[in-house]
Amino acid sequence: MFSATNRYRMLENSLLSAEVKEGEILPPTIQKLMKGYNKYLRPFFDNGPVTVGMSLDVASIDTISEINMDYTATIFLRQRWTDERLVFEGNKSLSLDGRLVELLWVPDTFIVDSKKSFLHDITVENRLIRIFPNGTVLYALRITTTVACNMDLTKYPMDKQTCTLQLESWGYNTNDVMFYWTRGNESVSGLDTLRLAQYTVEDHYTSASEAIYETGHYPKLIFHFELKRSILYFILETYVPSSLLVVLSWVSFWISQSSVPARVCIGVTTVLTMTTLMMGARTSLPNANCFIKAIDVYLGICFSFIFGALIEYAVAHFCTLNHPNANIVMYGHQMGGFDEEMNGMVTTIAAENNRAKRRKEKAAAVSAPMAELELVPSSPTGSEPKPEAPEEPSNRCLTVLVLLRKFLRKAANCCHVENPHLIDNYSRMTFPLSFVFINLLYWTYYLYL
């Protein structure tokens, strides 16, 4: 153990004697500070944990991805702690080259939910080291990191997302290191001047806690910030076009029912356009997503109204097919024509049945004398009863047709339409009023509830 410590000191002495710039060596003050310094041992190694204060500036939030559920931010992370081994006389701080951080002990802070991070190194590594006379060390870094953020997209695009930036110690537990925010909620700055494409930062605050793992309890600092999505883009991009498509589908209510190509063209075109709009609205969202989003609900409502307008014309046109001259549609009249056909069928079947009965009676009258001559002696009276003839199939068919005619007549009375042109008149009022009412419910729920 003693030999290993000597080797560390020999290495440090060799580093101290190395040239930092051409023709220059480390100043005597720094050489004195570093004499006997062991960067592998934390400050106050035998006197309790070292306290590390944190603060940060948010330089930018570059991207916020709903597909990957993460955000990318560039931050200036500053850490302060006191190292009693670096106390020196004077009243001025020492600003050192960032590359000298390799000679000092620094906290092993890491970003918990980071997917990827890097330290900027143009033109040199963006690190700052400043030592104060009382042994306080200021260590600052410029980092760009991509951090996971769990999002609830149920109210998308009228949603609010709360993301976090969590800082922990990797190897030192709470017995060795303690983290704290240097100025509470004011320890984080830069959000007030931040401008994002689709979001505004509504609120932010800081908190401190402990991370519990199998290996122990570790200090943790958490920065929370709330993002509210700007809905104006989606109103212009999705909500207004879909609403206009619904209004366009209502134009068919003012076109004559005889103009079949015009009304069918409007209905099919609006349905296909709405389908394309629905597919385009999902391109920036996760493909496999368990959320039913607010924008999906609205697009589904618009598609239902457009498809309903197409079905309305199909029903109205069907009611006018059998009465093109009178221009009056009555489903009961259509059923009346069917009744006449049914009556003709019933009359024909009844006539055929009567003719068959008469033929049977004549045949029975002719064959009666012949039957008496052929009687068996065991039946001298010849009065043995004959079995009854089975029910004729024509009778059963007649009964079924009568019942079917009654059923269709009742159904026709239920679907009775005096004037099929009234279907368009009613639709001109019911479709817009229903759409406005559903819109009131939709916006009230997703904006205020």
Image (cartoon, grey):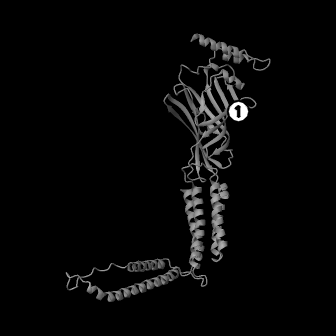
48, 407: nearer the viewer:
407
Point out residue 322 in the picture as x, y percentages from the top left corner.
Answer: 57, 80
Residue 240 image-quadrant placement: bottom right
Q: In this view, does 130 lie to the left or right of 413?
A: right
**Residue 358 in sight from this viewpoint:** yes
Q: What element carries label 1?
A: loop
Residue most extreme to the top:
3
Residue under the image location 34 percent in, 88 percent down: 361
381, 174: nearer the viewer:
381
Check disc 1 and report the residue beneath it: 120
Mark 1 residue type: His
70, 198: nearer the viewer:
70
Residue under the image location 56 percent in, 60 percent down: 444
Residue 192 image-quadrant placement: top right
Point out residue 188 in the picture as x, y percentages from the top left corner.
Answer: 63, 38
**Residue 92 in sight from this viewpoint:** no
399, 275: nearer the viewer:
399
The answer to whether 105 is drawn above or below residue 424 in the figure is above
Q: In this view, does 9 lie to the left or right of 442?
A: right
Q: In this view, does 401 lie to the left or right of 314?
A: left
Point out residue 412 in the picture as x, y percentages from the top left corner.
Answer: 48, 78
Point out residue 258 in the picture as x, y percentages from the top left corner.
Answer: 64, 77
